Image: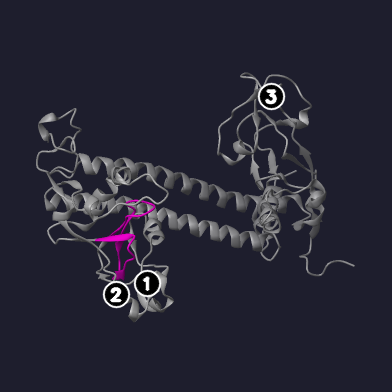
């Protein structure tokens, strides 16, 4: 009796029946060479390591990879990828997936990807995750019987994948640009024409020597303690030792909250204080720069709302004549220096005596504003692309659920496709 839950023209099949799964060859050091085709292991398909070893010989063709082949990592790391690294040899603990003739390989890739998420849940808690070939019979998927409809389904999902990859590439590039821009903005600054000054090596007359190295002639070196009021929350009792101090409505920021902000404005918090807790603490106003002084040294965030701090976070309330974002960027630039000052022990920490005298290179206020604006524009673009990537992943997840169960059909698209004349 047909399964009435399936759309017309669809079938239910196990992963095991849709393809053959060929385990890679058991390469060991006697096969390794500096010549020949690459040996592909899990590290190569996850991108965590470039090609390390090669094999300069011949093996049966089912061990050989070519662009477009599907690889299923079934041990240790559960993953499915389409290989695009050119001719190579497949190592053990990886399956080369060879679709049956009535199964579209691109659609099978998406079906496997969706199934891997379920496999990962089932193997949660295992010291070594793995899926045996025989277990693939336990995982059922639905798909159209018509190859054209299978191909159309895959094309929709491939298009989303391409958009996601392109967006991720833009994000990676923007992060590189932001890192380089941050260094240039805080060492070269912006001239009256709104451009980065040329480097000191090209225009030495625009720079002067300072304790921090070469800085633009218009800049000065000032300690953080003269730029901001730097202080710790004032405790007469450690709230962490008594639950009566927690659970109210007053935001109490933690070091992890600061680290997660990565220098940005932070309005979220993982803890709150009761009225009793606020009585033994200090509230810092919005726009205070939060600076961690324990464990991860000199992570920073700018408060979007007033908050209370534990003793592992210091607040820098910037004086009105300075730009808060510029000061935060300058502290962030000094992170490595501050981290080096911390005792190299199990629990690294610095104190106010390390922060207040911290020398910063400071331009005139107008240039501080320009620097902050240039940085914020780059950060805003990065956040926009990041939000778009999240949206595309969510859209793909929803579409996979709809398309790969037949709730949404692509048959109307097939009907609109031009037909070839006999």
Q: Mark 1 vs mark 2: which is more N-terminal?
A: 1
- Residue name at image x 27 percent, y 45 percent: 334
Q: Which residue in the rendered view is the most extreme toward the bottom?
A: 275
Q: Position of residue 344 (x, y in %)?
A: 37, 44
Q: Which mark is residue 280?
A: 2
Q: Which mark is residue 239?
A: 1
The residue that disc 3 covers is 29
* Quadrant of res 251: bottom left
Q: Which mark is residue 191?
A: none
Looking at the picture, does residue 201 appear above or below residue 165? above
Q: Which residues are magenta?
A: 290-315
- Residue name at image x 25 percent, y 40 percent: 184
Q: CA distance from mark 3 to mark 1?
A: 58 Å
Q: Is residue 293 magenta?
A: yes
Q: Position of residue 96 (x, y in %)?
A: 73, 38
Work out which quarter of the rendered image holds the C terminus and state it: top right
Q: Position of residue 193 (x, y in %)?
A: 14, 43
**56 or 421: which is nearer to us?**
56
- Residue name at image x 13 percent, y 55 percent: 226
- Residue name at image x 40 percent, y 42 percent: 173
Work out which quarter of the rendered image holds the N terminus and state it: bottom right
Describe the colour scheme in one phrase: one colour
**70 or 175: which is nearer to us?**
175
Q: CA distance from mark 3 to mark 2?
A: 64 Å
Q: Mark 3 vs mark 2: which is more N-terminal?
A: 3
State the SS at label 2: loop
Mark 1–mark 2 CB contact (< 8 Å): yes
């Amino acid at each position: 009796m047909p399964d009435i839950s399936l759309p017309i023209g669809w079938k239910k099949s196990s992963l095991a029946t849709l393809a053959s799964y060929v385990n890679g060859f058991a390469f060991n050091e006697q096969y390794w060479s500096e010549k020949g085709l690459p040996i592909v292991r899990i590290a190569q398909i996850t991108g965590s390591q470039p090609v390390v070893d090669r094999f300069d010989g011949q093996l049966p063709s089912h061990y050989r990879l070519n662009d477009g082949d599907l690889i299923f990592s079934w041990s240790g790391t559960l993953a499915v990828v389409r290989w695009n690294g050119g001719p190579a040899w497949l190592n053990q603990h990886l399956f080369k997936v060879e679709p049956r003739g009535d199964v579209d390989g691109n659609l099978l890739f998406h079906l496997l990807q969706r199934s891997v998420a379920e496999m990962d849940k089932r193997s949660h808690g295992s010291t070594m995750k793995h899926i045996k070939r025989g277990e693939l019979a336990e995982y059922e998927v639905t798909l159209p019987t018509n190859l054209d409809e299978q191909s159309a389904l895959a094309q929709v999902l491939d298009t989303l994948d391409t958009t996601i990859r392109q967006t991720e590439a833009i994000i990676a590039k923007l992060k590189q640009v932001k890192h380089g821009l941050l260094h240039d903005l805080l060492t070269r600054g912006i001239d009256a024409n709104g451009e980065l000054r040329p480097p000191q090596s090209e225009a030495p007359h625009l720079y002067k020597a300072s304790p921090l190295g070469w800085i633009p002639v218009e800049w000065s070196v000032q300690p953080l303690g003269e730029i901001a009021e730097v202080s710790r929350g004032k405790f007469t009792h450690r709230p962490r030792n008594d639950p009566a101090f927690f659970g109210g409505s007053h935001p109490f920021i933690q070091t992890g909250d600061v680290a997660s902000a990565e220098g940005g404005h932070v309005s979220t918090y993982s803890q709150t204080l009761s009225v009793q807790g606020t009585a033994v603490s200090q509230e810092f106003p919005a726009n205070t720069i939060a600076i961690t002084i324990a464990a991860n040294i000199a992570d920073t965030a700018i408060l979007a709302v007033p908050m209370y701090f534990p003793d592992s976070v210091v607040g820098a309330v910037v004086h009105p004549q300075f730009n808060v974002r510029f000061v935060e960027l300058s502290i962030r630039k000094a992170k490595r220096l501050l981290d080096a000052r911390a005792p190299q022990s199990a629990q690294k920490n610095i104190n106010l005596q390390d922060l207040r005298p911290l020398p910063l290179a400071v331009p005139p206020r107008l240039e501080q504003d320009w620097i902050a604006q240039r940085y914020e524009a780059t950060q805003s673009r990065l956040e926009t692309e990041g939000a778009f990537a999240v949206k595309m992943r969510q859209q793909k997840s929803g579409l996979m659920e709809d398309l790969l169960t037949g709730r949404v059909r692509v048959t109307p698209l097939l009907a609109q496709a031009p037909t070839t004349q006999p």
